[in-house]
Each structure stands twice: as C-alpha cells, then as structure tokens.
Amino acid sequence: MNIFETKHKEERKILERFLSISVNNDDEIFDIFKNLPNATYRQGERPNERFVYIRGTRDDKVLLVAHADTVWDKNWIGEDEKYTQKLGYSFGIYYNKNSFLDFGIGADDRAGCAILYLLRNSGHSILIVDGEEHCQVGSKFLKNANKDIFDEINNHCYALQFDRRNKRDYKCYNIPVEANFKEFIEKNLEFSDAGKNSKTDIVVLCDKICGANLSVGYYNEHTRLECLDYKDWLKNYINISQMLENKQIQFNLNNLDKEEDDLSK
C-alpha cells in the first residue's frame, strides 16, 4: 500500500464495507441510510419501489444520488439464487475471488453508495434509490408517487449521480443542460463528456435542475469480471468532496424537450 492509500484508511474501510454487502440483496444498504439522522424512507407496493432521502442543511445544497440495487438483485434473478461475492484486492484493484461464478462485486453502484455515505455530513442532500438497473424503478416511484420530495429535490442547485464506469468522465444524457453546467463540471473535476446515449436515475429526477453522472472507478460492470480501481475511486471522491465544499451556484434546465435514449449506462 502506498502513502496515498494509507492516508485514507477510513475511506477505504467504508468502501470495503459497501463492496462486501451481498450483491443479491439491497436491504442492508437501505438500513445503513435509513438509520442516518433526518432520513425519510418511502416504499411502494412493487419490488424496488423505494428510496431514502436525507435533506441537506446548506442553503446552496446539491442533490447527491446513488442506487442500491445491482443486476444480481434477488428481485431480478429470483429468490433461489444466492449471489454472495468474495472480495479480493490486488495491485490496487478490487475484484471477486469467486470470479468463476457469473456475478461481480456490485461496484455498480455500491461504489457510489460508499461515496454518498462519506458525504453524509457535507450539508448536501443524499438520495439512495432502488431499481435503477431495471428502468429506474425507484426514481419513477419517487417522481410519480412522492410529489413533495420530487419538487424539493428540483429546488437544489443541481444533481450529481455517482454511477459511471471509468475514472474521469461524466454524462448528462438527454437532460437539457446548459453549456455552462458542463463547463462547470469539466473545469472543476477535469472530467470529459462521454456523450448522451443511455439513461440513469437523474434522467428521471432532473425536471428543473441540471444533473450529471460521474465516474467512480469501476469497470466491466454487469459481468463476472467487474472490478474497481481504488485509486480512481479515491481520487474522484477527494476531488468531488473538495468541489462540494465551495459555494455552489444554481444550474437550471433550459426549455428543450428531453429525447428518448436506450437504457444502458
């Protein structure tokens, strides 16, 4: 372990805690966030219709988003299948020691959930949703059945989701953001625009505010070769947390209609 890694033992401990939670079940993720102060938990009638929202304390708060489910969720593959990863670490890379089995480590999006947990005292708002991997079930439940929360989150300065592969890119998808929002992301984080195709929760959630989905250092998601580069994850967490300490400005959407895109991230 190098000096850069040893300076951030608490961050690594939190990351490993989240990566060790079974990819088959989201309940433990929700229990962690439901037990935080001022958490609002709502659940619908259908599987994966749920979210946890924690209102930020800052006047210039940003909405921070991640999803709890993985593609190996029991609601998608069946209750009889038990997918429990065995976390390995070598040369700065987290991977599944049970790689001969057909599932990964759930870094999509447990890596994002870990970042939100580390930012829980930042004064910004936290939103953990379920069902992203299957057409944003939890986000649609929030939008369609929880107007009070939906209206509130669209009064934030902007939204950031932590649910992208790779180490230094972002997507706004078909969200009609203004050019100055992309310039803000690129200048502050030195991220590159990865294009408009595909979809994730912020496409559903961002009705009045701009939003971007940021890389969190995982690769080969949705496969047994899924892995996470710890240095990529940690650097992005540090840079993003520093950016969020600054005074935030409002980024509203323009009046363009959203386009239809495919469903992959």
Image: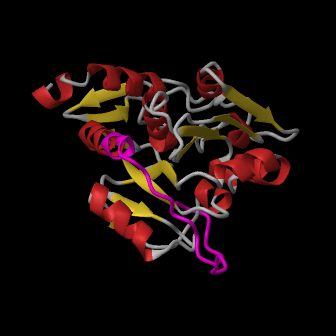
Quarter of the picture holding the N terminus: top left
Determine if the magenta segment contains residue 92.
no
Q: Position of residue 97 (x, y in %)?
A: 37, 29
Q: Judge from the rendering whether residue 189 lies leftward or rightward of residue 216; answer left or right.
A: left
- Give residue 170's position: percent from left, percent from top: 40, 61
Q: Residue at x 81, y 50 (%)?
A: 147
Q: Position of residue 113 (x, y in %)?
A: 50, 35
Q: Which residues are magenta?
A: 241-265
Q: Position of residue 205 (x, y in %)?
A: 66, 56
Quadrant in which residue 176 is drawn: bottom right
Q: Is residue 162 left or right of residue 146?
A: left
The answer to whether one can see residue 234 in this image is yes
Find the residue positioned furthest to the right: 45
Q: In the rendered image, is residue 2 in sight?
A: no
Q: How many marks?
A: 0
Measured along the vertical axis of the image, is residue 88 above or below residue 241?
Answer: above
Q: Residue furthest bottom?
A: 256
Which color scheme did the rendering employ for the protein? Answer: secondary structure
Q: Determine whether, in the image, residue 22 is placed left or right of residue 237.
A: right
Residue 264: say if magenta.
Answer: yes
> Camera-side residue: 154 or 107?
154
- Please name the predominant secondary structure of the magenta segment in the image: loop
Q: What residue is rendered at 27% in x and 44% in y?
A: 232
Location of residue 91 (image quadrant) = top left
Q: Hey, which quadrant is residue 66 in on the image?
A: top right
Q: Nearer the viewer, residue 51 or 255?
A: 255
Residue at image point 27% right, 20% down: 9
Looking at the image, is 220 positioned above or below residue 27? below
Q: Residue furthest left?
A: 3
